[in-house]
Structure formats: structure tokens, C-alpha cells
Amino acid sequence: MDKITVKVMSCSCKMADITEEGVSLVEDLYKRRQPLPSMDAIYFIQPTKENVTVFLSDMAGRSPLYKKAYVFFSSSISKDLVSLIKADSRVLPRIGALREMNLEYFAIDSQGFVTDNERALEELFGDNAESHNSNACLNTMATHIATVLASLREFPFVRYRAAKSCLDASTMTTLRDLVPTKLAASVWNCLTKYKSTIPHFPQTETCDLLILDRSVDQIAPVIHEWTYDAMIHDLLIMEGNKYVYECPSKPGAAPEKKEVLLEDHDPVWLELRHAHIADNKAAQIHHNLRDGELSTRDLQKMVQALPQYSDQIDKLSLHVEVRSFINQSP
């Protein structure tokens, strides 16, 4: 895998999920790898010239790295790159599959995803935004969004907010005014290709895709959300979805550091993440613990919610710790 597809997989599954499917080793495309000529390899990579060149180098010559290569691209591959692969007669017999997977988005939970364009705000709306960088950013975002719709087998009506200057001849159109329009056009171009390339893809519209920019709602970024999820990301130092906290260890010893992943595998996180911070059960339990009023019913609820008690009690203590930190914050 390459840098992007590693992130796609990391958001979607764990290493244990991969090994359960019979994969014995996961490696970086751009790191030096040990030849395994008796084993097949699966390539899950972006369809870029650099990636295709490395793949062809792996499988060419008298001693290829692997017995057979099964290649899956994270988005649509260009005709030029397909021709480049076809032109290498040494590699073609060693290819077991060559397919487009259309998986180029990053799932943050079961109902949300991001396109992970860290510099999008600067490249699209910055004072020094250039047309070339802006178009490249929009095309990348459009590809990622389109792969979501390909995965869902949805062909949407693409609706967007047109720039005011498009409707008023007296107003000059700027690059940033056209961001929704250009993004909508780029997404639509990707989707129309899917109609003829993806089996069983809808041929008529099935849903709506609404594209807006921040000018529609300028106040939203400064309004604070009061959900447990929002408060955690606002008040704690998080590395993606990982939180490191200290908990008491043996008397006289230094506190023990623990790492916790706040994700769908944590049932306590699933239960609390969208709850209002004042209403979540962790807050209630912490309040009862502090006042010495933990009832039998509270204990029963805790045990019922934690079928794998030894593992989940650590998760519960994390959320109590987080709640305590939030209470102390201004």
C-alpha cells in the first residue's frame, strides 16, 4: 500500500481483520522489501504514475518480487497508465487482477467520512490562492467524494450554490466564488464515468448531493457544540482518535500511561459520543461516585453495559477521567 491507501485501511479495519483474511504481511510500497517469489501479492494503491512505475519494477525482470500480483486501484485509473501497464510484456502474465476499487476516503465513524485535504482552506480561499493549486485540490476532493458514492452505489443529483456574480453581470467573479461550482462539475464528471465502468451502477439519479461553501453559514465555526465528542476534541490533546492518559498504579510508583482509541470498537464511546455533555451516563456515574451515592441499580447498569468487564472497565475509567477534566476546564 502507499501513504493514502494505508490511511484508508487504517480507518476501515484493524491489522487483525486483515490477517484473518489470509494476509501474512503488510508492507509500504516505497520501502525496501524482501523478495517473496513463492507468494502472491495484493497491491492496493492510488492510480498514480509513481505507484504504477514501482509496481512494474517489482514484477519485471527474471526475478520478480512476487509470484503473482493482484492490483486494486483506490480510484479510476487513466488510459495512459493502463497503456503503460499493457506495454510491459514481461509483467502482464504475472498480473492476476487489475481493478478499480474506488475507496479513497477516510471513514471517521459509521456515518461520517473526510476527504483529508489539510491545505484545502489555504489553497481554495487563501489570499495567495493560485488557479493551478486550486484546481488540483478540487479534483482530489471530487475524486474522494465520488469514490464514496461509488461504494454506496448512489448516483446523485449534484446541487450546488452558484456564485452571486454568475447571476449578476455587474459583479466580478473571483476564484473563491467558483469553488462550489467547480467542485460540483468535477464530482459530476467522475460520476458520469462510473455509469459506464462500474457494473450495476445506477443509470438514473437516486439521491441528492448538496455542495455548499462556508459563505452560506459563516457563524457555524464559532458556535460551540456541546456533545461529548465535540468537547473531547476541543479540550483534550488528541492524535486523530487516540488519547493518552495517566491512571494510578502501585502505591509510590509513577502513574501508568494508557493509550485508548475512541472508535466504534468502544461501546461506551458509541453510547456517549453524540449525547449532550450534561446528560451522558459517564457524567452521572462520576457525580454519584464523587458524592458516595453509587446505588445498586447504577452498578447493575454498569455491569450490563460492560460484557467484557476487564477490558471495558478501563474504557469507562477513561471516560470518567475525561469528564473530570472537562468539568475542571473554564
Image (cartoon, rainbow, N blue to C red):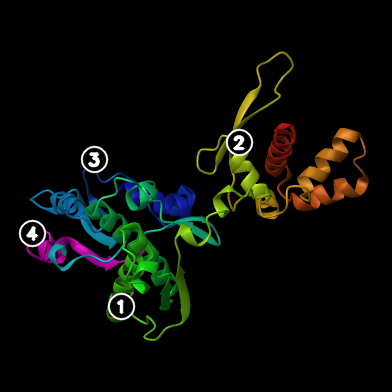
Q: Nearer the viewer, mark 1 or mark 4?
A: 1
Q: Position of residue 231 (x, y in %)?
A: 65, 44
- Residue assigned mark 3: 34
- Residue assigned mark 4: 90
- Residue assigned mark 1: 192
Question: In the rendered view, does 274 fall on the left or right side of 305?
Answer: left
Nearer to me, 201 or 226:
226
Amino acid type at image mark 3: Gln
Disc 3 is placed on an element classified as loop
Q: Position of residue 142 (x, y in %)?
A: 34, 63
Quadrant into which the C terminus falls: top right
Q: Is residue 42 visible?
A: no
**Range of magenta residues:** 82-103
Amino acid type at image mark 1: Thr
User: Dots 3 and 4: beta carbons under 8 Å?
Assistant: no
| Disc assigned to residue 236 | 2
